[in-house]
Image: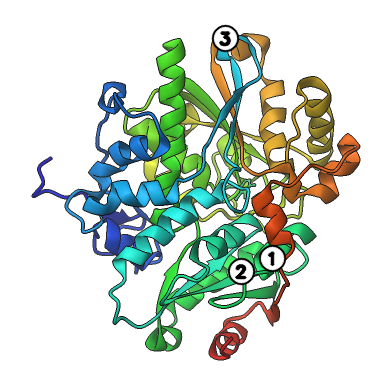
Amino acid sequence: MSAADPLRFVSSRGAAPPLALGAALRQGLASDGGLYVPERWPQLHAEDFAGGASLPEVGARLLEPFAAGDALAAALPEILREAFNFPAPRVELGAQGRLAVLELFHGPTAAFKDFGARFLAACFTRLRAPQEAPLTILVATSGDTGAAVAAAFHRRPGIEVVVLFPKGRVSPTQERQLTCWGENVRAFAVRGSFDECQRLVKEAFLDAELRAGRTFSSANSINLGRLLPQSVYYAATSLEIYGRYGAPASFIVPSGNLGNVLACLWARRVGLPIRRVILAHNANRAVPDYLASGTWQPRSSVATLASAMDVGNPSNMERLQALYPDLDALRAAVRAQTVSDEEIRERIRRGYAQYGQIWCPHTATAAEVYERLSPAERTSEHWVLVATAHPAKFPEIVAPLIGRVPEPPPSLARLFARPTHCREIAADLAALRAALEETG
Ligand SMILES: *Cc1c(COP(=O)(O)O)cnc(C)c1O
């Protein structure tokens, strides 16, 4: 690859023009309704990362080939320093690094989605020309995405954020984090499921009437700019384990819309030392069932304790299938398991008793899947449980199980103190159009 040969991103449905990184970020969803994926995979080696172990340093090296030839390329190191200004510590729970928790909840809204949202906001700020019409970021959320996106874009000039969440399907604490912003951030409570919120966003993007008056972009995990930066913490963690133990890392990833686990699989594809990847799902078991049966059957989502994973029809399935078009290859590449609410509760109780760890309901699914591994599997790998959110985001669930209220980190405590605003709408495009026309 030469500088004259930039890497472009193609639609998972193959019928949209390929775009360079910046354009693909702005476009969000490809014009054929598909999702952007890299047209080819750069190959990197652990040695390529020598001399820089921080998240921004690893990120600059990892993402450089994806930005090659694009206007964002030169700003990438600065974007990463701005976006990744909090750590992703790996906390070891087992001897010889055989079991660790990767804490992805040290950002402003205490969930892993801060990484992608902040990266995207840093990119959008640089992509937008000062005289351009305001940009509307439309985001459907099952809980944490909306909060992370709102926090990342709050008060950014020329950018408006509209958050759609399923009314009554997010925890009271999450709802507070979605509705506490104001100014350039509006929250709509949709009378429907997360899948319906997601469908509304897709419809709005393709709706000529709405597009006529404004420039839309997405900040969902369908946006490449959310997904790509998430590869950075997998890269950094696997390099750290490789450096210390001379062995690859294996990850168990709490999964819903599959954005987080795709980032892990992309990191593995470009050559990072990652071995096994297991998807931990809640009772929304479309993916585990697909791997078992070979038939893809999207469903309506069911409500569970791990509500940010309540996705019956994950849109990133298209990216997973683009990565592994062949079912046997997919089965060799990943495993997937389903975890019930009762098992989540029990795992939170035991995690506290056994390790002194307080796990959020999402993280508990990964811990449960780990406990199901055979003793031989447990000791043959360097397992990393991906902790996707801070337990203090879910006090209603966690406190009764462990007998104490998890202490919110300071950033979360500040959010909890803000006043809230929100508007309720029906789950149809006409209602969304009407609500968008209202200002403020
Ligand atoms: C969004 C989210 C998930 C699921 O991640 P996907 O990328 O949608 O698979 C898991 N846990 C938490 C806390 C989340 O916010």
CA distance for labels 1 and 2: 6 Å
Q: Which mark is residue 193?
A: 1
Residue name at image x 66 percent, y 58 percent: 143
Q: Is the C terminus in the top left, top right, bottom left or bottom right quadrant?
A: bottom right
The residue that mark 3 highlights is: 96
Element type where label 3 sits in the image: helix
Give the Cα separation between the discs numbered 2 and 3.
Answer: 44 Å
The three-letter amino acid code for the residue at tag 1 is: Ser
Q: Is residue 292 left or right of residue 224?
A: right
The residue that appears at 37% across and 64% down in the rendered structure is: 124
Question: What kind of residue is marked 3?
Answer: Gln
Indicate which label's residue lies in the foreground, 2 or 3. Answer: 3
Q: CA distance from mark 3 to mark 1?
A: 43 Å
Position in image of residue 336 (x %, y %): 60, 34
Residue drawn at (64%, 52%) of the image: 411
| Percent coordinates x, y for residue 298 in the rendering | 60, 54
Quadrant into which the N terminus falls: top left
Classify 33 as above or below 120. Answer: below
Mark on residue 364?
none
Helix, strand, or loop for circle 2?
helix
Give the number of the mark in front: 3 or 1: 3
Determine which residue is flagged by label 2.
197
Give the quadrant of residue 381: top right
Q: Earlier in the sequence, mark 2 or mark 3?
A: 3
Three-letter amino acid code at disc 2? Answer: Cys
Q: Residue at x 44, y 81 (%)?
A: 207
In the depicted view, which residue is nearer to us: 81 or 256? 81
The answer to whether mark 3 is within 8 Å of ligand 1 is no
Asked if the residue at tag 2 contacts the one at tag 1, i.e. Cβ–Cβ closer than 8 Å, the answer is yes
Q: Residues within 10 Å of mark 3 (few under 14, many from 20)?
A: few
